[in-house]
Image: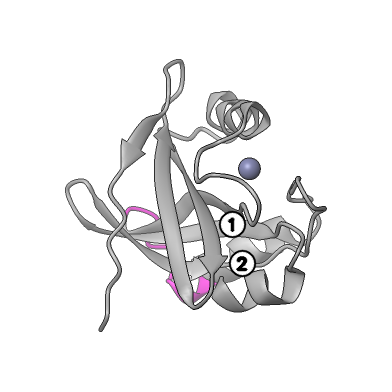
């Protein structure tokens, strides 16, 4: 994600998050895809390649969907605070309320690279309700 931010600068970038369920309410980001760069103030992930990336992840994790699954989305805010925009909220709500995705929740990580520090804010969206904050912990191991 850090490398993608550097490459896309000054534009936004982002992609999908695939997760590993490690404890009751704890998920590890197992993989973050990079779906190209957006504009100065906007990033919308295209659908191209998304499904095949997810299928490759399922294959690598031996279709253990309880443990390894789609976790959500990430994108950068190089010029804005680490809070979802109205459009960000709408996109995530659409994702989680889409009957086709059958998602029980979806996480959104918003990241900002300043100097050499990476700041991350996390939010979780549930079908039919508002977003909540999630705690983001960096695993140094
Ligand atoms: Zn945003």
Counting residues from the start of the chain, the first of labels 2 and 1 encountered is 1
- Residue drawn at point x = 60 percent, y = 70 percent: 56
Where residue 8 sits in the image (x, y, percent)? 75, 69
Q: Does 45 sit left or right of 83 as displayed?
A: right
Q: Does 120 sit left or right of 16 as displayed?
A: left
> Quick one: SS at disc 2?
loop
| Residue 23 among those drawn in magenta | no
Q: Does 110 sit left or right of 75 as displayed?
A: left
Q: Mark 2 and 1 residues: CB-CB less than 8 Å, in contact?
A: yes
> Quick one: SS at disc 1?
strand
Quarter holding ligand 1:
top right
Our reading of the magenta stretch's main secondary structure is: loop
Where residue 24 sits in the image (x, y, percent)? 17, 48
**Number of numbered discs visible in the structure rendering:** 2
Q: Is mark 1 within 8 Å of ligand 1?
A: no
> In the picture shown, does residue 139 fall above or below 130?
below
The answer to which image quadrant residue 107 occupies is top left
Q: What is the basis of the colouring in this image? A: one colour
- CA separation in Å, label 2 and label 1: 5 Å
- Residue drawn at point x = 70 percent, y = 63 percent: 52
**Which part of the image, by quadrant, shows the C terminus?**
bottom left
Which residue ends up furthest to the top in the rendered image? 128
Q: Which residue is mark 2?
A: 33
Q: Which portion, as a residue range, is magenta?
A: 59-66
Q: Which residue is mark 1?
A: 16
């Amino acid at each position: 994600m850090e490398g993608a931010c550097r490459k896309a600068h000054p534009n936004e970038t982002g992609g999908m998050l695939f997760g590993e369920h490690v404890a009751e309410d704890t998920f590890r980001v197992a993989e973050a895809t990079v779906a190209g760069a957006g504009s100065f103030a906007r990033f919308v992930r295209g659908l191209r390649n998304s499904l095949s990336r997810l299928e490759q992840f399922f294959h690598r994790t031996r279709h253990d969907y309880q443990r390894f699954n789609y976790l959500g989305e990430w994108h950068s805010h190089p010029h804005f605070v680490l809070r979802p925009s109205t459009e960000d909220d709408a996109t995530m709500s659409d994702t989680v309320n889409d009957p086709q995705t059958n998602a029980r929740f979806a996480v959104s990580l918003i990241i900002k690279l300043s100097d050499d520090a990476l700041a991350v804010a996390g939010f979780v969206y549930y079908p039919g309700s508002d977003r909540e904050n999630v705690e983001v912990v960096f695993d140094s191991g």
